[in-house]
Image (cartoon, rainbow, N blue to C red):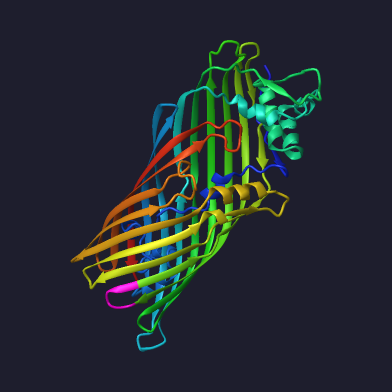
Amino acid sequence: MKKLFLCIGILSMPFLNAQDITDALRYSQQDILGTARFRGMSGAFGALGGDLSALQVNPAGSAVFLNSYGSVTLSTNRISNDAFYFNTFNSTNTNNVNFNQVGAVFVYNNNNNTSGINKLSLGIVYDQTSDNANEFFVSGRSTNSIDTFFLSEAQGIPQGLISRRSRETVGDLYSFLGENEGYSAQQAFLGREAFVIEANDVNDPNNTTYFSNVAPGVFDQEYFYESTGLNGKFSLNGGAQINQNLYIGINLNSHFINFDRVTEFFEGNNNTGSNVNEIIFTNRLSTIGAGFSAQIGGIAKLSKMIRVGASFESPTWYYIEEETTQRLETLSDTDGRAIVNPNVINIFPEYKLRTPAKATGSIAFLFEQQGLISLDYSYKDYSTTQLSSDEGGNFANLNQEIENSLQSSSTIRIGTEWKYDRWSFRGGYSFEESPYKDELIMGDRTGFSIGAGYDFGKFKFDVAYDYTQQEREEQFYPNSAFTNFAVIDTYVDSLTFTLGVNF
């Protein structure tokens, strides 16, 4: 018996764009993450400052600090996904732990100045902007087979192009197709090699039409999704207090993306006349990226009771690289079990992503030293998201789809904090509109939070609990003829702990 050795081929794919609208949206959104005080008030800090994660909203917040300060934050998350697919329900829970914030701000007070610049601040902060860890499982019975995916990709492709020659391996032809023909040819080859589809004229290498070896009927289907990684940013902040009532600030942000995903689709049938009774289709995606953005902002004291804030965050300009692998397995009455595993890594040309800019207006009401109420309103137009490439990639159709499908989105965050002796007690609420014009694709996101903190003097300790909910459609293979999707209702609850120190 021959031994099978794993062979990894690496290739460039100039004709293939693996990206879709969900990828562009994934890297354009941010979660409410950061310090426990920030999360305990649902991130409503645009007119307040005085917290390291508040610099995410308004960089002028660093100048509000009375003295130099540093903090580190740990959070635990539980993600619950309720999946509905053809009247079948499945629930999946995922738990993870992250250090999602660390940083410090250094404050220089010019106490002798009664006009002009009274204070300067310099901040260096790391913030996790989104958690990519997620998992869900879908099962149900459908009348649509995944064979439509392979059939639609194959139609129009000559049979001779996707047929192996003498001594040509699966990996050899899969690599050639990726380098020279693109995504559809690779999928057609996988489907034909695993006997899902067959040429109408098997003896004609110029044949361009195909039929399915899967008979119509009902199909028991399962879909497993697992992703890992996180997105974050490092911010260099500068701020100043001018006179007694105005704070200004600027952030220069360096962003990174780390996203890995594996999906596995299973289909089984006992349909009369079906030559193929099982299909298992596995796809892996690995994404890394780096980007840059800038923010400016200001906070003004209108009175002892009222503060207002305004900030603007530029688009983030990302450079993104992606890699994929695929595997297809079938069980056939006549051909037995067929495993098509090219062991080839598809490396896509680097592309650029420009995410939307964001504008935020804020107001806060302070009740001397007893407590406060804060409100933030943010506006972000997701239809302005754009992809481009310096290496020949054509994103015109995807950019048009983004413009047609996405919309501007408003976010409202309300937070409050009340003090008793050395204790602080907090609560908050957040609402974010769907970025999609069709809210059935992705609904609004809502959340609430509570928290508490204790001031030891030099040290501070804070804890927060927050909860968010959002419903969306998960299409298994976007932009394909196989249009089946599940409805996923996602609930995320988190515990966050922050240790801060004055120095």
Residue 194 visible from this viewpoint: yes
Where's residue 127, x and y in %? 44, 58
Residue 321 visible from this viewpoint: no
Asked if residue 306 lies in the magenta stretch, the reply is yes
Quarter-wise, where is residue 316 in the image?
Answer: bottom right
Residue at 77% in and 38% down: 180
What is the magenta range? 302-307
Q: Specify the principal SS of the magenta part.
A: loop
Residue at 61% in and 44% down: 19
Residue at 68% in and 37% down: 183
Left or right: residue 187 compared with residue 312 = right
Q: Residue furthest left?
A: 421
Left or right: residue 165 compared with residue 300 = right
Left or right: residue 282 compared with residue 296 = right
- The answer to which of 176 and 500 lies nearer the viewer is 176
The quarter in which the C terminus is drawn is bottom left
The quarter in which the N terminus is drawn is top right
- Residue 224 drawn above or below residue 296: above
